[in-house]
Image: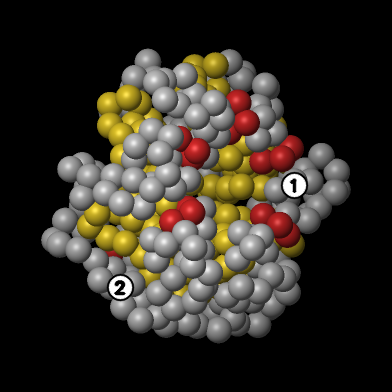
Amino acid sequence: MFRGQWIGLAAAALAVSAPLAATASAFNSPGNILITDQFNNRVIEVDRTKEIVFQFGSNDPALCNPGPGSVIAPNDAERLADGLTLIAGTGSSACPDNRVIIVDHHGHIVWQYGRAGIAGSGVGQLNVPVFAVQAPDGNILITDQANNRILLVDLITHRPIWSYGPVTGPGALNNPNSAEVLNNGHILIADENNNRVLEITKSGVLVSVISKGLNIVAFASRLPNGDTLIADSGNNRVVEFNRSQGTVFACATNTGPGSNANPNPTGAVRLFSGNTIIADQFNNRVIIVDAQCRIRFQYGETNVVGNGANQLNAPYSAVVIGQYVGLTPPLATKF
């Protein structure tokens, strides 16, 4: 059985943090790259000279302090209008975060859903939120992984207004890892541990399933031509399928010099040029590759863990600011 139910719940608390300054005038410039540096407990924005122009979070993998000015093991970050940044504070089993937050360019938390360090499925609660986007109606769509649900939260009232899951039957989710809003209003879900990509309607009807040869689906987006771009993490590759699930593009990230045998890439976004930006998680790098899978840009040293210059620690997502091909685009209106 499928279930897509509209629900109204009480508001969650709003949290405001101490400031964490952004750097220089290059902040939020088109072409910069926004990265969730997961195990360094931070989100960074870098320019093409590899300078960090924005940072939110500690850059300290040892800290466990979810709260103002900090985030623990973020899985996803999206740049909204006016330089605001939407962050999924995923946390870890040893140090939970369980918040989705919006921060301004000074590092103030201006919006929050979920309670820092507390897991739950009730009013104002999340359990391992891994992904969030601003939907076309302005509200926040959250992939609430451990609750096996997708949740739409009203931006103004902090009231959940729609959810999908947990459900039973063919549409049941198992550790969902992302959810994008398609142009037709449907929801595209990376159903990670079911090794598939689902498309559902807002009423909970299962429209399509993509599963051919997939293993641990970390992220999926629907390209303008109808193809689906997938971070096929368990197979250490990014793959693009056409509507018949034929392979249009494939890029393995575990074959280059010094590569981790199992880097488990977790994010892949198509760029205007036709290149693809990949968060190559356990190779500790973000790369931009061309149609032949040749690396054209890299941030982070291959298979080197670090938190210094040009170093990352299990980056989970990466987007090029201003290039949202196949993604739910940020709104042009103010927050």
Amino acid beneath label 2: Leu
Q: Is residue 18 above or below residue 234?
A: below
Residue at 38% in and 48% down: 306
Q: Which residue is mark 2?
A: 20
Q: Nearer the viewer, residue 191 or 331?
A: 191
Q: Which residue is mark 1?
A: 173
The answer to whether residue 320 is left or right of residue 171 is left
Residue at 38% in and 70% down: 103
Q: Is residue 166 above or below residue 294?
A: below
Closer to the chain start, of discs 2 and 1, is 2
The answer to whether residue 158 is left or right of residue 30 is right
The answer to whether residue 19 is left or right of residue 192 is left
Q: Position of residue 271 (x, y in %)?
A: 34, 34
Q: Nearer the viewer, residue 315 or 166?
A: 315
Residue at 72% in and 71% down: 120
Q: Position of residue 105 (x, y in %)?
A: 28, 68
Residue at far left of view: 25
